[in-house]
Amino acid sequence: MVRHSKGMMVGGIVMTSLAPVAVAVASFAWLGEEFCNVDGDPAEPQQRCDYDSVIYGSLLTAAALVGAGVPLIVIGAKKEPEAPEATATITPWATRTAVGVGLRVSM
Protein backbone atom coordinates (compact mmCIF):
# COMPACT_ATOMS: atom_id res chain seq x y z
CA MET A 1 0.00 0.00 0.00
CA VAL A 2 1.28 3.45 -0.95
CA ARG A 3 0.01 6.98 -0.36
CA HIS A 4 -2.05 8.59 -3.11
CA SER A 5 0.19 11.67 -3.34
CA LYS A 6 2.88 12.88 -0.97
CA GLY A 7 2.85 16.30 -2.65
CA MET A 8 -0.86 16.79 -1.98
CA MET A 9 -0.38 15.76 1.62
CA VAL A 10 2.57 18.13 2.17
CA GLY A 11 0.74 20.98 0.44
CA GLY A 12 -2.30 20.46 2.65
CA ILE A 13 -0.19 20.40 5.79
CA VAL A 14 1.55 23.64 4.82
CA MET A 15 -1.73 25.35 3.95
CA THR A 16 -3.43 24.24 7.15
CA SER A 17 -0.48 25.29 9.29
CA LEU A 18 -0.54 28.81 7.78
CA ALA A 19 -4.17 29.38 8.79
CA PRO A 20 -3.32 30.36 12.41
CA VAL A 21 -0.99 33.04 11.04
CA ALA A 22 -3.91 34.60 9.17
CA VAL A 23 -6.06 34.43 12.32
CA ALA A 24 -3.26 36.12 14.30
CA VAL A 25 -3.06 38.92 11.70
CA ALA A 26 -6.83 39.41 11.97
CA SER A 27 -6.73 39.53 15.77
CA PHE A 28 -3.83 42.03 15.84
CA ALA A 29 -5.67 44.22 13.33
CA TRP A 30 -8.80 44.04 15.48
CA LEU A 31 -6.78 45.03 18.57
CA GLY A 32 -5.19 47.89 16.64
CA GLU A 33 -8.61 49.13 15.61
CA GLU A 34 -9.95 48.89 19.17
CA PHE A 35 -7.05 50.75 20.77
CA CYS A 36 -6.70 53.38 18.05
CA ASN A 37 -6.98 56.94 19.48
CA VAL A 38 -7.49 55.69 23.04
CA ASP A 39 -5.21 58.34 24.53
CA GLY A 40 -5.56 60.90 21.75
CA ASP A 41 -6.39 64.54 22.36
CA PRO A 42 -9.99 65.29 21.34
CA ALA A 43 -8.89 68.62 19.83
CA GLU A 44 -6.50 66.90 17.41
CA PRO A 45 -7.82 65.32 14.21
CA GLN A 46 -8.56 61.64 14.56
CA GLN A 47 -6.31 59.07 12.96
CA ARG A 48 -7.73 56.71 10.39
CA CYS A 49 -8.55 53.53 12.33
CA ASP A 50 -10.34 51.44 9.75
CA TYR A 51 -8.83 47.94 9.63
CA ASP A 52 -11.98 46.12 8.53
CA SER A 53 -10.55 45.07 5.16
CA VAL A 54 -7.49 43.56 6.87
CA ILE A 55 -9.61 41.76 9.45
CA TYR A 56 -12.10 40.27 7.00
CA GLY A 57 -9.44 39.53 4.40
CA SER A 58 -7.35 37.63 6.94
CA LEU A 59 -10.33 35.66 8.22
CA LEU A 60 -11.37 34.74 4.68
CA THR A 61 -7.80 33.72 3.91
CA ALA A 62 -7.72 31.49 7.00
CA ALA A 63 -11.01 29.87 6.03
CA ALA A 64 -9.78 29.29 2.47
CA LEU A 65 -6.49 27.79 3.68
CA VAL A 66 -8.26 25.35 6.00
CA GLY A 67 -10.98 24.64 3.44
CA ALA A 68 -8.44 23.67 0.79
CA GLY A 69 -5.77 22.19 3.07
CA VAL A 70 -7.85 19.59 4.89
CA PRO A 71 -9.13 17.87 1.72
CA LEU A 72 -5.60 17.85 0.31
CA ILE A 73 -4.36 16.09 3.45
CA VAL A 74 -7.19 13.56 3.39
CA ILE A 75 -6.91 12.75 -0.31
CA GLY A 76 -3.11 12.73 -0.33
CA ALA A 77 -2.86 10.46 2.72
CA LYS A 78 -5.28 7.87 1.37
CA LYS A 79 -3.58 4.49 0.99
CA GLU A 80 -4.06 2.62 -2.25
CA PRO A 81 -2.61 -0.62 -3.57
CA GLU A 82 0.68 -0.28 -5.32
CA ALA A 83 0.24 -0.41 -9.07
CA PRO A 84 2.06 -3.35 -10.61
CA GLU A 85 4.72 -2.46 -13.09
CA ALA A 86 3.65 -3.25 -16.62
CA THR A 87 6.45 -4.79 -18.65
CA ALA A 88 6.76 -5.86 -22.23
CA THR A 89 9.44 -8.34 -23.24
CA ILE A 90 10.44 -9.30 -26.74
CA THR A 91 11.75 -12.85 -26.89
CA PRO A 92 13.15 -14.55 -29.93
CA TRP A 93 12.27 -18.22 -30.40
CA ALA A 94 13.43 -20.88 -32.72
CA THR A 95 12.46 -24.47 -33.38
CA ARG A 96 13.66 -26.97 -35.98
CA THR A 97 10.97 -25.84 -38.39
CA ALA A 98 10.31 -22.16 -37.59
CA VAL A 99 11.88 -18.97 -36.25
CA GLY A 100 10.11 -15.90 -34.82
CA VAL A 101 9.86 -13.18 -32.26
CA GLY A 102 7.38 -13.23 -29.41
CA LEU A 103 6.01 -10.38 -27.33
CA ARG A 104 5.18 -11.08 -23.69
CA VAL A 105 3.22 -8.43 -21.79
CA SER A 106 2.73 -8.62 -18.03
CA MET A 107 0.49 -6.16 -16.23
Image (cartoon, grey):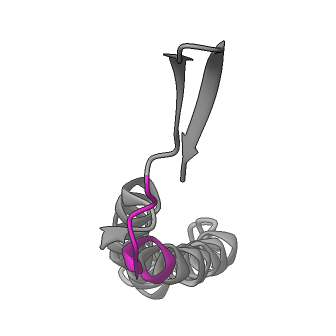
Q: Which of these two is toward me, 14 or 38?
A: 14
Q: Position of residue 87 (x, y in %)?
A: 50, 37
Residue 90 against residue 61 in the figure, above or below: above
| Residue for point 58% across, 83% down | 67
Q: Which of these two is toward me, 88 or 33?
A: 88
Q: Is residue 77 left or right of residue 63?
A: left
Q: Which of these two is toward me, 48 or 103?
A: 103
Q: Position of residue 29 (x, y in %)?
A: 46, 74
The magenta-colored residue range is: 74-84
Q: Is residue 21 among the parts visible in the rendering?
A: no
| Residue for point 45% across, 83% down | 74
Residue 7 against residue 13 in the figure, above or below: above
Q: Position of residue 54 (x, y in %)?
A: 60, 69
Q: Is residue 52 among the parts visible in the rendering?
A: yes
Quadrant position of residue 78: bottom left
Residue 38 is one of the magenta-drawn residues: no
Q: Position of residue 97 (x, y in %)?
A: 63, 14
Residue 97 against residue 52 in the figure, above or below: above
| Residue for point 64% across, 66% down | 48
Residue 78 is one of the magenta-drawn residues: yes
User: Exactly how many numbered labels are in the figure?
Assistant: 0
| Residue for point 64% across, 79% down | 60
**Residue farthest toward the front in the current orientation of the protein:** 96
* Position of the N terminus by quadrant: bottom left
Quadrant position of residue 61: bottom right
Q: Which of these two is toward me, 12 or 95?
A: 95
